Image (cartoon, rainbow, N blue to C red):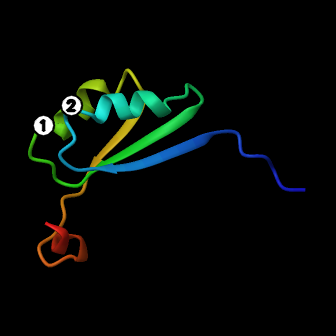
Amino acid sequence: MGRALSRLCLYGTVLNSADTVERSIRSVFRPDADIVITDGGSRDGTYERLLEISKDYNLRVYRAPARAGAWGGSWR
């Protein structure tokens, strides 16, 4: 038998979600879970808001702006 996983990791990406990001994180927050959020280059203060609340929700916050010519850039 394999070892049981002891922790849950929730991962999400955001883009220009400063007004809703904390409410969204709060809705899935569990003290026994790690939450990893990657900001895709928001220009509305989302990344800064994530940094402000990171200790309250034990977040790992990363910034990975989309590169010009990347597939995701075609959705703009």
- For the C terminus, which image quadrant? bottom left
Q: 10 Å neighbourhood of mark 2: few (<14), some, or many (≥20)?
A: some
Q: Which mark is residue 45?
A: 1
At 23% from the left and 55% from the top, the residue drawn is 40
Q: Please tell me whether residue 19 is drawn above or below residue 55 in the rendered image.
A: below
Q: 10 Å neighbourhood of mark 1: few (<14), some, or many (≥20)?
A: some
Q: Between 72 and 32, which is closer to the camera in this rendering?
A: 72
Q: Label 2 sits on what residue type?
A: Arg
Residue 67, by quadrant, is bottom left
- For the N terminus, which image quadrant? bottom right
Determine whether the residue tagged by mark 1 lies in a helix, strand or loop: loop
C-beta proximity under 8 Å, tags 2 and 1: yes
Q: Position of residue 3 (x, y in %)?
A: 81, 50
Q: Which mark is residue 49?
A: 2
Q: Between 3 and 46, which is closer to the camera in this rendering?
A: 46
Q: Position of residue 65 (x, y in %)?
A: 18, 59
Q: Label 1 sits on what residue type?
A: Gly
